[in-house]
């Protein structure tokens, strides 16, 4: 991990993989944060120089109060790209990170060389309401987010032994911070009028979705396609994966990204 500080004075840790000889790719994580192991990043690093920053509230730095609304998150994303010295990188975002990536592409349509939205949040369909993840316990989350809930529990808890009181306390406090930060843009309804701005996106775009996604079913990907009128957005549905497709099917997820952006 390397540490960077934006012009606004917000320090962030950035996980880097791959070689600088490859084109740059910025990966924005979802509400679960960066896990100890991120298999999709390793797959992407075979084709890109990968930069995966931690959002405020998800790392050791107590900077979450610096981001208050959707515009703050969006501009922080561009501030990170600036301080990393990247010129028109590919931008990939998962879930909450996909929502932010879409906003970044709408606010600066010429600043990216490609956009990949992995089960991106940010839209709302009355006929398909998004379940309230903020009211769920870890085992309930696994059932909603993963096609294989048992494997999902291991990913979400990072193998922690909840019989250890200190480990349990650390997990609960960390999880509360993450969800508190994510809640600024995802709660109570993940609709910050992104749908009104998606027409501005002109970057080559790929939508990658888990076929078994129960949080944001593939109908949300289809709605993104309809709203991205300024570009042709390709849609890849991945079987054997739900909302956490970067963890359940990392090779297929990376392949779908590379097919368009690589």
Image: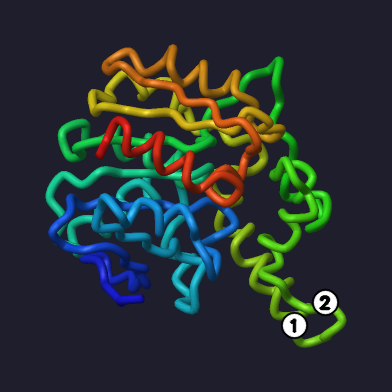
Q: Is residue 115 above or below residue 82?
A: above
Q: Residue at x 52, y 23 (%)?
A: 221
Residue at the disc numbered 2: 162
Q: Residue at x 31, y 52 (%)?
A: 26
Q: Is residue 243 above or below residue 184?
A: above
Q: Residues within 10 Å of mark 1 (few under 14, many from 20)?
A: few
Secondary element type, mark 1: helix
- Quarter in which the C terminus is drawn: top left
Q: Is residue 38 above or below residue 169?
A: above
Q: Residue at x 40, y 53 (%)?
A: 43
Residue 230, percent from left and from top: 27, 16
117 or 45: nearer the eye?
45
227 or 211: nearer the eye?
211
Query: Which is nearer the N-term, disc 2 or disc 1?
Result: 2
Residue at the disc numbered 1: 167
- Quarter in which the N terminus is drawn: bottom left
Labels 2 & 1 near each other (Cβ < 8 A): yes
148 or 67: nearer the eye?
148
User: Which of the 4 quarters of the picture holds residue 86?
Assistant: bottom left
């Amino acid at each position: 991990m390397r540490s960077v500080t934006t012009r606004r004075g917000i320090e962030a840790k950035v996980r880097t993989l791959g070689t600088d000889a490859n084109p740059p790719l910025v990966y924005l994580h979802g509400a679960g944060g960066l896990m100890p192991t991120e298999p999709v990043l390793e797959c992407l690093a075979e084709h890109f120089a990968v930069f995966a920053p931690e959002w405020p509230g998800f790392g050791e730095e107590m900077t979450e109060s610096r981001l208050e609304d959707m515009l703050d998150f969006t501009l922080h994303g561009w501030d990170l790209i600036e301080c990393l010295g990247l010129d028109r990188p590919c931008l990939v975002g998962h879930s909450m990170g996909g929502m932010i990536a879409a906003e970044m592409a709408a606010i600066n349509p010429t600043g990216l060389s490609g956009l990949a939205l992995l089960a991106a949040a940010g839209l709302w369909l009355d006929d398909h309401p998004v379940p309230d993840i903020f009211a769920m316990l870890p085992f309930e989350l696994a059932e909603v987010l993963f096609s294989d809930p048992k494997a999902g529990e291991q990913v979400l808890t990072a193998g922690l032994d909840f019989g250890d009181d200190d480990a349990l306390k650390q997990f609960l406090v960390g999880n509360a911070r993450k969800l508190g930060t994510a809640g600024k843009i995802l709660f109570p309804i993940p609709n910050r009028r992104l749908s009104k701005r998606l027409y501005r996106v002109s970057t080559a775009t790929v939508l990658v979705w888990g076929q078994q996604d129960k949080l944001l079913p593939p109908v949300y990907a289809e709605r993104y396609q309809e709203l991205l009128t300024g570009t042709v957005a390709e849609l890849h549905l991945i079987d054997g994966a739900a909302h956490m497709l970067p963890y359940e099917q990392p090779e297929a997820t990376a392949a779908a990204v590379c097919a368009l952006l690589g």
